[in-house]
Amino acid sequence: MEALSRANVGHAPAYGTDELTNQCIELFRSLTTPQCEVYFVFNGTAANVLSLASQMRSWNSVVSSSVAHLPNDECGALESLVGAKNILVPTADGKLTPILIEPLLIRRGDQHASQINCVTITNPTEIGTVYSLEEIKNLRSFCDQHRLRFHLDGSRLVNAAASLDCRLSDLLMPFDVVSFGGTKNALMFGEAIVFPRGTSGDEFKYLRKQFMQLPSKTRFVAAQFLEFVGTDLWLENAKHANAMAARMSAGLANSSYARLTQKTQANGCFAVLPRKLVSRLREHYFFYVWDEHTFECRLMTSWDTTPEDVDGFLALLEKLGAENV
Ligand SMILES: Cc1ncc(COP(=O)(O)O)c(C=O)c1O
């Protein structure tokens, strides 16, 4: 908010030509390569769809995990706006591997089949697990070997970086294009589409405008990203959110009313909770039921979750559990 206030003085050129946006682009270049390109957009769905639109034509398909946000929670935006297809791969832990993707390539070159040309992953995954740098490297080599573009939905990329104890550049450089999340990590609004090696081509700016994602007052998004990425704020926020998830996970592991279903590696815990307790818990703590059949629930923590929030949730689970059993 202070960075926004500082940016809210005087006048500045619009549509990405202001000083703060230039500084932000330079910041990303210093983290990646001098060719890196950065485009701000309003939200994460647009970041994903535009990132993929830059790589795909209507006869292409992108491979994603079956639990990815792209096919499940973006209202068919990719299919509707790009016309491209999304191929879903079931996974045990939300993570794609070369072995899972390879069989899908069999119809490349067949004019009757939609042509796979992209792989997209989310890190952390939608079920709270984190791809290691080695796993990402293997996927990158596989993509190079098969001439596939590689996209990262980095809506929570900073949580993955904090979990892996790596640099942001380690999570940017392996990809052709990255949706770099801001909003889920405390920004008021705004996401960045980053082409770490600057391969967007000259036409991406037209695509962003056509998709109605060119903010006129870009400086307000840039001011937030400068503060977030240009200082240790991203790490502080991400470490805190991850620590709160670890606290939650430890509590759930000790509870007889919860069964963890995934490793907690970033800022999300997945656990089956007793069906009859879920609505009572949600009267006090909002969370989503991830699987309506099993009552596997998705408990996310954030930069401002407090230890008291976590302990309060765990205490309520024990109290309601004891009353109902
Ligand atoms: C992994 C992931 N990607 C993308 C998005 C899309 O973000 P937005 O809601 O800003 O469109 C979300 C939002 O929940 C998300 O969790």
Image (spheres, grey):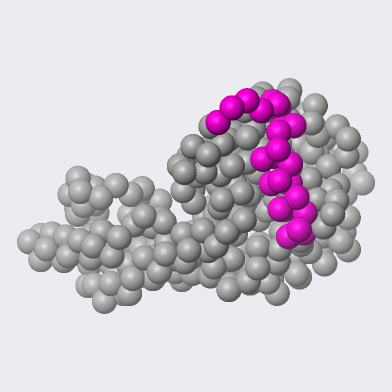
Residue 58, picture quadrant? top right
Q: Please state which of residues 23 and 115 is positioned toward the viewer in this rendering.
A: 23
Rendered view: 213 above or below 264: above
- Quadrant of the snapshot with the C terminus: bottom left
Judge left or right: residue 283 versus residue 170: left
Q: Please state which of residues 92 and 5 is positioned toward the viewer in this rendering.
A: 5
Rendered view: 9 above or below 194: above
Q: Please state which of residues 162 and 256 is positioned toward the viewer in this rendering.
A: 162
- Quadrant of the snapshot with the N terminus: top left
Marks counted in the figure total 0
Determine the residue located farthest toward the left in the rendered image: 323
Judge left or right: residue 304 versus residue 78: left
223 in magenta: no
Provide the residue span drawn in magenta. Answer: 9-32
Question: In the image, residue 263 lies at what x, y percent?
Answer: 46, 71
Question: In the image, residue 169 lies at what x, y percent?
Answer: 71, 63
Question: In the image, residue 171 lies at what x, y percent?
Answer: 68, 63
Q: Please state which of residues 126 and 174 is positioned toward the viewer in this rendering.
A: 174
10 in magenta: yes
Residue at 54% across / 68% down in the picture?
162
Residue at 33% across / 71% down in the picture?
247
Can residue 94 be seen in the rendering of this structure?
A: no
Residue at 82% across / 67% down in the picture?
141
Can residue 178 be seen in the rendering of this structure?
A: yes
Question: In the image, residue 63 lies at what x, y percent?
Answer: 71, 50
Residue at 69% across / 46% down in the picture?
24
Rendered view: 29 above or below 39: below
Determine the residue located farthest toward the front in the rendered image: 10
